Structures are given as C-alpha cells and as structure tokens.
Image (spheres, rainbow, N blue to C red):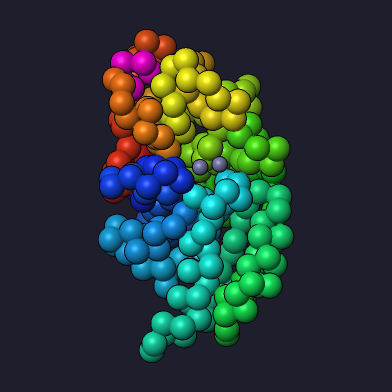
Amino acid sequence: MQLTVLGAGTGVPLPRRSPAGVLVQIGATPLLFDLGPGTIPRLDAAGVSYRDLEYVFLTHLHPDHTLDLAMLLQALNYTPGFTRARPLHLIGCPDTKALYEGLLRVYSSVAPRGFELTIREISAERIAFGAWTIETAPSGHTATSIAYRIEAEDKAMVYTGDAKENPALVEIARDADAFVCECAFPRGYPTDDHMTADAVGRVARAARVKRVILNHLYPPALQVDIIAQVRAEYTGEIIVAEDGTRVSV
Ligand SMILES: [Zn+2]
Ligand SMILES: [Zn+2]
C-alpha cells in the first residue's frame, strides 16, 4: 500500500497544509478518504486522475472534509472528451446520503450523467472488497464520525479523520503499520472534540502502532515541538504530515 496525505491541514487556510484528503493506493486501485477543498487537483499532482476513482470514503460531513465532492461530480460530468461509464462508489458516515441530496438541491449539475453513483452509509463495520478490507469505528469527533482501517497485502493502515481519544480508536488502530492520526492541537489545549498531541501518543502506544503520521494540524500544533509532545507518550516512528507526504506501508 502507498498512502499519500493530500491535505494535512484543517479548515484554517495554510500554505503547506490544505484541508483533509488521504489517498491510498493498493496496486492499481486508488482509494480516496475525505475530499476537502482542493483535494481533486492535489490528487492529480499525486499522479492519480479523478477520472480513475471508483471508491470515495467520508469520515464526517464537515466542509474541510467534503467540499470537493461537488467538484468531483461536476468534473466527472463535464470534462471535455471524457465520458464516465464505471460506477462511482461513495461510502461514508451516516448522513452521507443527506449530504448528496443537499448538494443536488443546490447544484443540479452534480447529478451523475451516464454513470451510476452508489451511496452506502456505514458506522462500525467490516467490509471485504476482494484484495482489500475496510473496517470502521466511531472516531469520537462528532456523533457519527468514523475512522477507517484499511487492510491489504498483509498490512494495515488507519486514518482517523477528525477524532477524540476513545477506546474504539485504540481498537481500530491495533498493531497498525501506519496510523494517520489527527493531531489538531498541542498538549493542554482546550478541546472537546479533537485530538491533542499527548492523546495521540497515548492512543498510539496503547494500540502498539508501528508508525504515526500526525495529520490535520491546526496552527497552534505547528508552533510547538509537536513530535516531542507525542514522543513523551510513544516511542515509535513519528512523521509530521505536510501536503504530499507519501509513505509506503
Ligand atoms: Zn477537520
Ligand atoms: Zn471535523
């Protein structure tokens, strides 16, 4: 598996950390997790065309994770010289259908032209797709937000999306080869619905993950030695994600 962080940031505009998006490539199959604004062109920069996407997964419905869904559908409909024939599978947290229906009400141009869009809502499930498997668990960020575990080629990676420290997060991250974890704020920062650096370290240690990729960093997390704060709890490999960070799993 190859994972590429397409957007390592949040809803706060920053030069090297754009809103959320993670690309996972399993052989020739690209899987896209979240698509905040600007994800589609950054996907292209990572060597994958939006035309070739078959599976898009959503963690939750905040704009920094979902706004490019409308752009993707519009691009599939209106790229000159291109006709989409294969289905597009949108899989996400509960309310994913409501998001699509809301988009349709406002943007009639996103209704698929010539291809099928399937939408499947999931909460805590394990789904096999042949050569790869997806498992989900509540991420704790919102009432319905989910984290994803992707297993393929005898490896496992986990993408938390936005999260809050909770036992389900430790379970889904268990022994993962790569743990792309939200690290929104430094230790001690007041938050009810995001991860702080010490919480990331505790979850990574409890789950015994092999490597942590710190993701979804708000500006306060970039103004401290964030690695040292995670390191205080966790002794494995730590990477601070930027847009384009690529890791072989
Ligand atoms: Zn977010
Ligand atoms: Zn969020």
Q: Residue at horizontal 44%, vertical 26%?
A: 185
Taking depth in this image into account, of 248 and 139 the one nearest to the observer is 139
Q: Position of residue 90 (x, y in %)?
A: 59, 61
Q: Position of residue 196 (x, y in %)?
A: 47, 23
| Magenta span dominant secondary structure | helix
Q: Nearer the viewer, residue 118 or 63?
A: 63
Q: Which residues are magenta?
A: 226-230
Find out whether residue 158 is within the magenta segment: no
Residue 105 falls in image quadrant = bottom right
- Please, which residue is most extreme toward the top here? 232
x 31%, y 16%: residue:
228
- Identify which residue is drawn at 62% across, 79% down: 108
Question: Residue 165: x percent and y percent?
Answer: 57, 23
Q: Would residue 1 be seen by someone viewing this image from the given angle?
A: no
Q: Quadrant of residue 119?
A: bottom right
Q: Is residue 230 above or below residue 103?
A: above
- Residue 197 lies, in percent from the top left, at 43, 21
How many labels, in total?
Answer: 0
Asked if residue 15 lies left or right of residue 176, the reply is left
Quadrant (top left, top right, bottom left, bottom right) of the C terminus: top left
The residue sitting at 51% across, 26% down in the picture is 195
